[in-house]
Image (cartoon, rainbow, N blue to C red):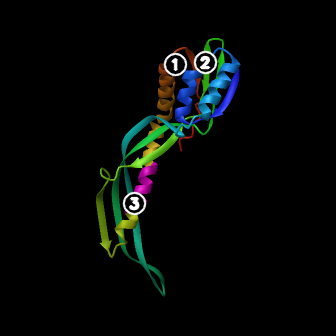
Amino acid sequence: MKFKFSLSLGLIILLITSVSQCRSKNQIQSKVNFILNENIQKISNWETAKLTTLAIVNISETKSISTLAGNMPIGKLEIAYQASGIVYAGFDLEDEVNIYKIGNITYIDLPAPRILSVELDHDESELIMENHVFISPSEGDLVLKAQEMGMQKLRDIACDKQLLDTASDQAETLIKQWMDSKVVVTIPDNGDCM
């Protein structure tokens, strides 16, 4: 007995616990239909791991004016920005989730884990160095670029620290805690970390 679903978090929890108690294909199908017909709020991302981290971004910009001889630099701004934030990893449950039962064992196939979001903590992030040379460019534009680069660096740090592996391990542990019966969880290890 194998069924394929594209599920929200609320649906997957209900289906996992309900399917494990069913004995036949008809019981599973009627339980699934009942759950899917209920008005459950849709939550498409299941966060199973997060990492709070820091990254330093160094960036500079030169200000120039146009002359008959070409562009002439008239100033430069260099900044160092400390980006503080949280990287969330887990599963996009809009992707296919397979739940099936063979004998008394429930099998759950989850999609590959991925980085779900990166949140920059604006209260903890700060400009830690700025160097103005002559008539420098606007600081605001450069800080926005530094914030974007900082978010990418936070993501890279999370990937280097195997946050997706942590997300997979945590998902498997949580599902096994939720289940009353024997369960086998399969998660591909080729998640998109970049």
Question: Cα distance, mark 2 to mark 3?
Answer: 52 Å
User: In terms of sequence position, does the residue under pointer 2 or pointer 3 come before the other?
Assistant: 3
SS assignment at label 2: strand
Circles 1 and 3 in contact, beta carbons < 8 Å = no
Rendered residue at 40%/38% (across/down): 51
Quarter of the image with the N terminus is top right
* Residue at which label 2 appears: 106
Tag in front: 2 or 3: 2
Circles 2 and 1 in contact, beta carbons < 8 Å = yes
Residues packed near mark 2 inside 10 Å, few (<14), some (14 to 19) or many (20 plus): many
Residue type indicated by callout 3: Ile
Residue type indicated by callout 2: Thr
Closest to the observer, 53 or 92:
92
Task: Give, as a single range, the part of the protein colored magenta.
Answer: 143-152
Residue 98 in view, yes or no: no
- In the image, residue 47 above or below residue 139: above
Question: Cα distance, mark 1 to mark 3?
Answer: 50 Å
* Residue at which label 3 appears: 59
Q: Position of residue 80 (x, y in %)?
A: 34, 57
Any magenta on residue 169?
Answer: no
* Residue at which label 1 appears: 179
